[in-house]
Image (cartoon, grey):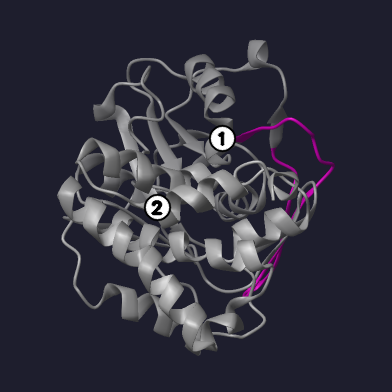
Amino acid sequence: MIFRARSKLESTLVSKVAVVGAGAIGATVGAWLTKRPAIDLTFCVRTPFEHLNVETPQGLITATPRQIVDLSKAETVDWVIVATKTYDALGAASWINALSDLNTRVAVLQNGVEHLSRFPSVNRDRIVPAIVDIPAERTKPGSVKQRRDGSIVVPANANGHDFAALFTDTSIDVQTVEDWQSAAWRKLAINCAGAVNALTMQPSGIARDAEIAELMRAFVRECVAVGRAEGAVLTDRLPDEVVDNYQNGPPDSINSIHADRLAGRQTEADARNGVIARLARQHGLSAPLNFMACILLKEGPAAV
């Protein structure tokens, strides 16, 4: 089934869109945009690929989109979609500057809650922060397996609605919400608990152990306290809900920070755990578990 995004883009208009980063998320989002005649798509990549091949629940999407690897070749676009890892923010910022004029809008499809502050050179009125839930794995440059239909959550403002319109008639369900901040902190609560999997090198099923489950709840309690101090509306039930989600999901499921550690890659521990500890200090709070996890995970296996 094909799901329609919540707002519409006039089909007679062509939007120039640049996707920065062709990892699992960037490639999947870009693949669906190639299905839209109203989108003129460019990928900004480190490693070019011959073809874009994304295996989706609806079938294989194959395309040969325009690619650039050199900042000097960048041209102004209507939308920049940042789909890099959070630790690549400086590199992404260089692409944003090369691709933008005063009218260019920037959608940040990254983990964490610092989407706006991560790009200080960009006017905040032009940034659309996005929460992404698209289970996908890159097998090689340009090739991705999307495991189920994905969703993206953005603020319910003019830019958010226009971003949603880019995905009209695709299987990417873009939702607009009034309280985006609270939604982002709820996602962070899920992500911060995933540090337990990365530290133990065990998949989601380990949450079925009672002591591990309580440890995960403790991670989330720290997140809830800091999120509330930041203004997010978070229920007391959130720690239990996060653990229930892990316990009731596939026991062999591996989250992204666990996968990065298994592969020896740099992790996003700072965006998933470190941010909780940093913001805790600003509010006179303490988040020792998330602080510890960030230290142990931020450099990958060599740090443990």
Looking at the picture, does residue 120 appear above or below residue 117? above
**How far is the residue under mark 2 from the one under mark 1?**
22 Å
Q: Nearer the viewer, residue 259 or 279?
A: 279
- At x 61% / y 55%, what residue is drawn? 28
Residue bearing mark 2: 288
- At x 73% / y 50%, what residue is drawn? 301
Amino acid marked by disc 2: Pro
- At x 39% / y 43%, what residue is drawn? 275
Eye-nearest disc, 2 or 1: 2
**Callout 1: helix, strand or loop?**
helix
Q: Badge 1, how many Cα within 10 Å: few under 14, some, many 20+? A: some
Magenta part of the protein: which range? 42-65
82 sits left or right of 57 in the view: left
Residue 83 visible in the picture:
yes
171 sits left or right of 116 in the view: right
Residue 288 x %, y %: 39, 52
236 sits left or right of 40 in the view: left
Residue 56 x %, y %: 65, 69
N-terminal of the pair, mark 2 or mark 1, is 1
Residue bearing mark 1: 87
Residue 167 visible in the picture:
no
Looking at the picture, does residue 100 appear above or below residue 195? above
